[in-house]
Amino acid sequence: MTKSTPEMANAEKTRRMESVAFVSLGCPKNLIDSERMLGLLAADGIAVTDDSNTADAIVINTCGFLEASRREALEVIRQAVESKNRAIRRGRSKRVVVAGCLVQRDKSRLLEEAPGIDALVGVFDRENIIAAVRGAAVIASPPADMGKFHAVTRMMGRHDRSRQGYTEQDGARLRLTPRHYAYLRISEGCNQGCTFCTIPGIRGRMRSKPLEQIIGEARELIADGARELNLIGQDTTSYGGDIGYNGPGQGLSGLLRTLDQLQDVGWIRLLYAYPSNFTDDMIRALADARRVVQYLDIPLQHINDEILHAMRRKVTRREIETLLDKLRRRVPGITIRTTFISGFPGETEAQHRELVDFVRQFGFDCLGVFEYSPEPETPAGRLWRTRGVPAAVAARRREEIMLTQQEIVFKKNAAMIGHTPGVLIDQADPRRRTAVGRYAGQAPDIDGQVRLHDCSVAAGELIQAVIEDWKHYDLIGRPLPATNGPREPRERRKPVRLPVASQ
């Protein structure tokens, strides 16, 4: 009979791998990857815990889009490795698995800066997360220089899955969002080639999901309780062009019309729409929809023609203004959200002033600004070496744009008093009879909220409310009597059908 050793017992415990702590960083696209990996782990019998100290493994799904996100990920990884090292010193095995964009972008440097990682999982290899987590056992008595000669399992996609023909399967997810809303990915990768963006190098070229796959995933999310579906991709406007959905009524407009027919969903929201090829048919689809809310997230990045050209945005100021004018005229009440970059290489004070004036004149409903981050492997990153805008100047310009937008939002909030929008409840406190929700003009996590008093409804309900006041970026109100008060359990009643207009 073979004699058992501490190392063998440790190996057996690692193979059982009873629990995993999971950290998800970055954008909603990354969140979907995290939810898919969690679903695979749960289906394999591995419990998910929020206690990284007792977990048998820690998984960090990283963002690597910008230098700031890279620094954040490295800090989380180092904390996980230290937790692992403490466990090993106590004679207990633990694994650290790092996945996602930072792995795909920077795996060699990652291992140098955060030694002690046990496995790397690239963005195209989520399906291997179980093997990465279970892995091989670590030794019970590590050397003093732990991690220097540490063997790392690399799951980095020997086959090229970043090009046409490969689509991510996003079903069977263990969702991290509240049950009543979810993100639905319609495509991955991007062909636009903006000079500041690292995404094509990380996620590959544009790959649209077939329509039937999207509908199947949407129905699965709705069956799981989602009342709001938020459509995402690197470039949602270009949906379908890479797989032959190029005819009239196809592409994004056809997808919106098809999703609009789904039952038992309250809101469908379009995020990350690229401006250069947003067509009249897409505008009509938004205007005619019942469940697709009149909300559009359309990142513009700048308005000055020289900066737009340097960014390789494939659109001019005049074209942007024409599109925005069409949207406001043809989709009355539409909420338009955008993002801009301050301090792009070579941006002059006059070009910045042009952007500030444009923000003031157009009056966006929601707006975010990012200070330019020089990413060395991008064309703009190389331009920054000779034409870089000082960080302090970029920060000052960002603040000026945001203060300009703040005035606009405060006026719009004041104008909402007396309106009675539908509100989807995100959080509820029955004891205090308060709740926090959103009307259709507010996307989760990025926009303001509606704070309700005298409210007796549960999270996930779609109710009618009257806006009575506002504070900063949030609206304040109360439910209308017909939609407030005790309700039957949700599974015993039919879904509430309420208007989904943004105002």
Image (cartoon, rainbow, N blue to C red):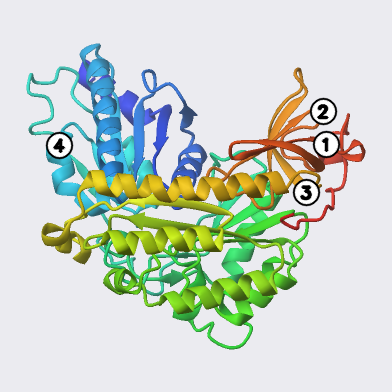
**Residues at circles 2 and 1 in contact by the CB criterion of under 8 Å:** yes
Earlier in the chain: of badge 2 and badge 4, it is 4
Label drawn at residue 146: none
Q: Which residue is mark 4?
A: 113
- Residue beneath the point at 91% across and 36% down: 481
Residue at the extreme right of the image, as rendered:
482
Label drawn at residue 421: 3
The three-letter code of the residue at mark 2 reads Ser
**Residues at circles 2 and 4 in contact by the CB criterion of under 8 Å:** no
- Residue 25 vertical placement versus 377 (above, below): above
| Secondary structure beneath label 2 | loop
CA neighbours of label 4 inside 10 A, class few (<14), some (14 to 19), many (20+)? few
Closer mark to the observer between disc 2 and disc 4: 2
Residue 119 horizontal side relative to residue 167, left or right = left
Quarter of the image where one finds residue 70 = top left
Earlier in the chain: of badge 3 and badge 2, it is 3
* Cα distance in 3D space between marks 4 and 1: 52 Å
* Cα distance in 3D space between marks 2 and 4: 51 Å
Q: Which residue is mark 2?
A: 456
Earlier in the chain: of badge 3 and badge 4, it is 4
- Residue 206 vertical placement versus 438 (above, below): below
Of residues 471 and 114, which is closer to you in this image?
471
Percent coordinates x, y for residue 246 in the rendering: 53, 85
